[in-house]
Amino acid sequence: MKENVLKVSQLKVAYGGIKAVKGIDLEVNRGELVTLIGANGAGKTTTLKAITGTLPSCKTEGEIFYLGKQIRGSQSFQLVSQRLAMVPEGRGVFTRMTIHENLLMGAFTRDDKAGIEADVEKWYGIFPRLKERSAQLAGTLSGGEQQMLAMARALMSHPELLLLDEPSMGLSPIMVEKIFEVIRNVSAEGVTILLVEQNAKLSLQAAHRGYVMESGVITMNGDAKDMLNDPKVQAAYLGEG
C-alpha cells in the first residue's frame, strides 16, 4: 500500500461568484514526482495556494490531508514547521537579504548547525553562481538566479513535500534545463514533489504521474509516460498530433 503524503478530496475554491477549482481529487505518494499541467488560468496555482493556506479571502471546501492530517484552513507558517515547503510562482525570495541569508532562512526550523552549513555548501555546489554572489542582495539577481535561490532555500528545510509552482516561467531555455535537472535529481534523492508547470513536455518527462487540469477540473490523470504519448495531451499541450 502506497503512503499518501498529500491527498486532496473534492477541493472547491470560489472567489465571489467565480469558481476557480470545481471539486478536484489528487494525491501524491511518498517519493513520487507528480505534475499538474494545464493552460494558464486552469486553477493550478489556486490549488497550490489552497494546500498551503496562502489564498486571499475566498470560499474553500473539501479535504486536504498532509501526512494523514487534515490541513485545510491551516496557516502557511504552521505548515513550514511540518516540513511542507513551496516555491511560489514569481520565486518569492527575500529581496533585501543576501543569498546566504535567504538560504539560512530556509533552515530556520532546524537546529543542527553542522547540517545546515553542510547543506548550504551542497547548494552552492549545485548552483555555483549563487556561491559567487553569496553576499549579494537577492533582489538584484536575474530571474533564473532567483529561481535557483528559491529552490535551494525551500530544500534547506528538508521538506517531506515540495510544491513547485511554475519553476520554468520566464526563464531562458538553458536555465529551464538546469532547473529541471535539479528537479529530477531532487526527486531521485527521494523527495516527494508536486510540480505545477505549463511546460507539459518537460514536466511529464520528469514525473512519475500526471494530472491535467482544465477550467477548474481534473480532466485526465495517469502514468506520466503514457500521458506523453496520449494524442489528446499531445494536441493540447505538446504542440503535436
Image: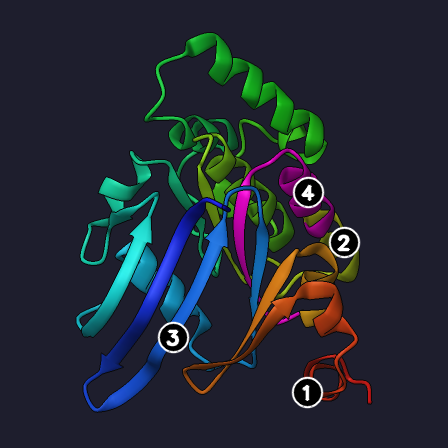
Does 9 sit left or right of 193 as displayed? Answer: left
Which of marks 1 and 3 precedes in the sequence?
Answer: 3
Q: Which mark is residue 24?
A: 3
Residue lying at 38% horizontally and 57% vertically, measured from the top left: 7
Report how far apart the C-alphas of labels 4 and 3 lie in the structure. Answer: 29 Å
Q: Mark 2 or mark 1: which is in front? A: 1
Q: CA distance from mark 3 to mark 2?
A: 30 Å
Seen from this angle, which residue lies furthest top? Answer: 114
The residue tagged 1 is 236
Q: Is residue 182 magenta?
A: yes
Q: What segment carries the magenta color?
A: 180-199
- Which element is circle 4 on? helix
Q: Nearer the viewer, mark 3 or mark 1?
A: 3
Q: Nearer the viewer, mark 4 or mark 3?
A: 3
Give whichever of discs 2 and 1 has the lower sequence position.
Answer: 2
Disc 4 residue type (three-letter): Val
Residue 234 in percent (x, y) is at 75, 82
Mark 3 vs 2, N-terminal side: 3
Where is residue 137 shown, x and y percent of the image?
Answer: 49, 37
Name the foreground residue: 58 vs 189: 189
Q: Which residue, given by chain and number where applicable, does mark 4 sit on?
A: 182
Q: Is residue 13 above or below residue 97?
A: below
Which badge, 4 or 1, comes first in the chain's sequence?
4
On the image, numbered disc 2 is attached to which residue? 177
Q: Quadrant of residue 64?
A: bottom left
Q: CA distance from mark 4 to mark 1?
A: 27 Å
**Mark 2 residue element:** helix
Q: Is residue 137 visible?
A: no
